C-alpha cells in the first residue's frame, strides 16, 4: 500500500501588511489538516485590486519577518519576482509541475475571497491543480449558507465539497473543504486606516512587522 502524501498549503495574498488574521488562518489549517507546510506567496501586481500601498519587496520583507520563527511556514517569492500580471492559476501550474502529479496541493483562502472566485482568471481550472480550502472569516457567510453565491460557484460547491479531511489526502486536487477557525476580525485595510489616523494597530500584527512599518514610515 502506498503512503499518502501530506498536502502542501498554498496561501496567496496581498499581505499589505501581513497580520494575525493571516497567521492564525495558516497555523490553524496547518494543524487541523496536518499539512506538510504552508507556502506564503505574496502577490506581485494583483490583477483584481488596485496597486498595493507599499512596494512588493517591502510586503515580502514583512511576511518574512512574520513567519521566520515557524519552520513549517515557507516564503515563496515567485510572484513578486515576476514582471507584470500574475494569475493564481499560472502559479499553481508551476507548483504542480515542480511537485509532481501525486502531491496534494491545497489553495488556502478566507470566505471573502472564495465568494469572489468566479472573477479570477480561468478560475475553474484551479480545481484541476489543487483543492480549495476555505476558512471562515468574520463578516462573511460560511460557504454552505451563502445565498449570494454566484450560480457557477454554487455548482462547483455542490459537486466538489467534502466534509472528510481525508479527501484532501486521497486525491491531489479537485475538492472544496471548509474549516472553521478562530474568528479574528482583522483586515489589512483596518490596519492601514489606523496607521493613517495616527492610531496604533499593535496586537493586531506581529511586533516585528509593526517595527518595520514604523522604521520605514509606511502607510502614514
Ligand atoms: P485588505 O484589507 O487589504 O483587503 P486582507 O486583510 O483581506 O487585505 P489579503 O492579503 O487580501 O488580506 O488576504 C489574503 C488571504 O487571507 C485571503 O484569502 C483572505 O480571505 C484571508 N484573510 C485575511 N484576513 C483574514 C481574517 N481575519 N480571517 C480569515 N481570513 C483572512
Image (cartoon, helix red, strand yellow):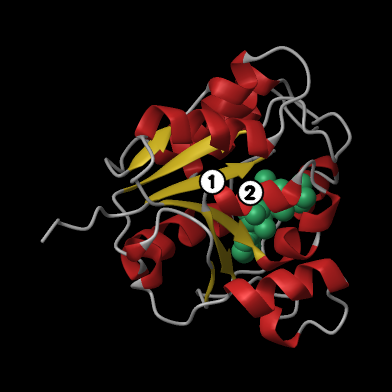
Name the residue furthest left: 1
The residue lying at 68 percent from left, 22 percent from top is 56
Label 2 neighbourhood size at 10 Å, few (<14), some (14-19), many (20+)? Answer: many
- In this rendering, is residue 218 above or below 18? above
Which is more toward the observer, 197 or 135?
Answer: 135
- Give the left or right position of residue 47, taking residue 172 as reference: right
Which residue has dot 1 on it?
Answer: 129
Label 1 neighbourhood size at 10 Å, few (<14), some (14-19), many (20+)? Answer: many
Query: Residue 141, position in %: x, y?
Result: 74, 80
Query: Residue 89, position in %: x, y?
Result: 65, 38
Name the residue furthest front: 1
**In the rendered image, is residue 215 in sight?**
no
The residue lying at 88 percent from left, 78 percent from top is 148
Which residue has dot 2 on it?
Answer: 126
The residue lying at 67 percent from left, 68 percent from top is 185
- In this rendering, is residue 192 above or below 53? below
- Give the left or right position of residue 126, taking residue 170 as reference: right
Question: Residues under labels 2 and 1: Cα distance?
Answer: 5 Å
Disc 1 secondary structure class: loop
Query: Residue 86, position in %: x, y?
Result: 72, 27
User: Is mark 2 in CB contact (under 8 Å) with mark 1?
Assistant: yes
Q: Quadrant of ligand 1?
A: bottom right
Q: In the figure, residue 178 lies in which quadrant? A: bottom right
The residue lying at 55 percent from left, 53 percent from top is 22
- In this rendering, is residue 84 above or below 25? above
Disc 2 secondary structure class: helix
**In the rendered image, is residue 81 in sight?**
yes
- Give the left or right position of residue 113, taking residue 57 as reference: right
Query: Residue 82, position in %: x, y?
Result: 65, 15
Amino acid at each position: 500500500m502506498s503512503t499518502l502524501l501530506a498536502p502542501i498549503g498554498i496561501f496567496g495574498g496581498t499581505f499589505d501588511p501581513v497580520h494575525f488574521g493571516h497567521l492564525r488562518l495558516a497555523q490553524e489549517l496547518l494543524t487541523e489538516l496536518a499539512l506538510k507546510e504552508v507556502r506564503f506567496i505574496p502577490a506581485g501586481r494583483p490583477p483584481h485590486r488596485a496597486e498595493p500601498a507599499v512596494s512588493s519587496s517591502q510586503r515580502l520583507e514583512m511576511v518574512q519577518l512574520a513567519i521566520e520563527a515557524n519552520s513549517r511556514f515557507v516564503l515563496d517569492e515567485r510572484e513578486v519576482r515576476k514582471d507584470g500580471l500574475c494569475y493564481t492559476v499560472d502559479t499553481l501550474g508551476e507548483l504542480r509541475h515542480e511537485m509532481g502529479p501525486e502531491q496534494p496541493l491545497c489553495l488556502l483562502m478566507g470566505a471573502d475571497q472564495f465568494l469572489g472566485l468566479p472573477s479570477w482568471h480561468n478560475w475553474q481550472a484551479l480545481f484541476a491543480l489543487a483543492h480549495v480550502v476555505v476558512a471562515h472569516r468574520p463578516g462573511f457567510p460560511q460557504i454552505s449558507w451563502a445565498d449570494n453565491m454566484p450560480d457557477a460557484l454554487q455548482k462547483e460547491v455542490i459537486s466538489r465539497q467534502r466534509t472528510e479531511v481525508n479527501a484532501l489526502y486521497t486525491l491531489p486536487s479537485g475538492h472544496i473543504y471548509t474549516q472553521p477557525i478562530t474568528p479574528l476580525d482583522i483586515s489589512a485595510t483596518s490596519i492601514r486606516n489606523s496607521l493613517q489616523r495616527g492610531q496604533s494597530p499593535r496586537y493586531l500584527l506581529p511586533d516585528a512587522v509593526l517595527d518595520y512599518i514604523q522604521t520605514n514610515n509606511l502607510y502614514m
